[in-house]
Image: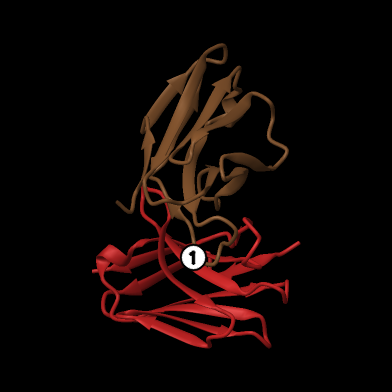
Amino acid sequence: GENVEQHPSTLSVQEGDSAVIKCTYSDSASNYFPWYKQELGKGPQLIIDIRSNVGEKKDQRIAVTLNKTAKHFSLHITETQPEDSAVYFCAASIGAGSYQLTFGKGTKLSVIP
Amino acid sequence: DTEVTQTPKHLVMGMTNKKSLKCEQHMGHRAMYWYKQKAKKPPELMFVYSYEKLSINESVPSRFSPECPNSSLLNLHLHALQPEDSALYLCASSQAGTTNYGYTFGSGTRLTVV
């Protein structure tokens, strides 16, 4: 089955700096890659996703890049703010017909004011 | 309405109790999920319902019994749980037949078994 590795497990950045979280996946059939943000006491919230026919996607301060050849994808957060502090999970899926999302183990991001 | 609503938010139950967790969505999603999340871990899939039929059971112990009364509601019936079942239980929904649009998660029920 699919295996998703996520690094780093913890990340501390100064407010205003950029943060990068990286994930690798094992199943070349995976074609959908969402990122979730989970704040304390809340459920995961989808913040951005990318499909395998796209190399990069951006939404304001958040961007995701995908390298299908290397089987890795990354989350980039620019101009970090204290409210970006949370646990971030990457995930992978083979998409249509599958209900399975394989999650990475999560990255705890702390933005220091 | 773009939310998944879970009740209760917190639940403390004894090992001999019977309780139920409830989940509701009105986004027209026809796939609904139960996940279990332990502290500092990613969510783990328990059950998937597609068009109100149980599609996936990830070898979950029978003390957890899911139910999907209609396309908007999902229940998880709990009976004779163990302390190690204490966790955050998350409900999610998505368009059926694909995960290509991600899941919408509820805020979860924090379950403590004493």
Q: Give the quarter of the figure containing the N terminus of chain A.
A: bottom right
Does residue B113 lie above or below A90 as drawn? above
Quarter of the image that includes the C terminus of chain A? bottom left
**Chain coloured brown: which letter?**
B
- Above or below, A36 against B107 in this view is below
For chain A, the rendered hue is: red
Residue under numbered circle 1: B101
Residue A62 at what x, y percent from top left?
36, 78
Residue A86, horizontal then vertical, whole percent: 38, 60
Residue nearest the viewer, comparing B53 with A52: B53
Give the answer, above or below, for where B60 lies relative to A47. above
User: What is the tally of numbered marks visible in this picture?
Assistant: 1
Residue drawn 61% across the image and 28% down it: B64
Q: Residue at x 71, y 64 (%)?
A: A2
Q: Nearer the viewer, residue A14 or A54?
A: A54
- Give the x, y percent position of residue B98: 58, 62
Which amino acid, mark 1? Tyr
Q: Residue A94 vs residue A111: left or right?
A: right
A58 left or right, relative to B31: left
Residue farthest to the top, as pictured? B16
* Residue under the point 62% across and 74% down: A31
Percent from the top left, x then y, of residue A71?
Answer: 66, 80
Residue B87 lies left or right of residue A59; in this view the side is: right
Disc 1 secondary structure class: loop
Q: Chain of mark 1?
A: B
Q: Quadrant of residue A84?
A: bottom left
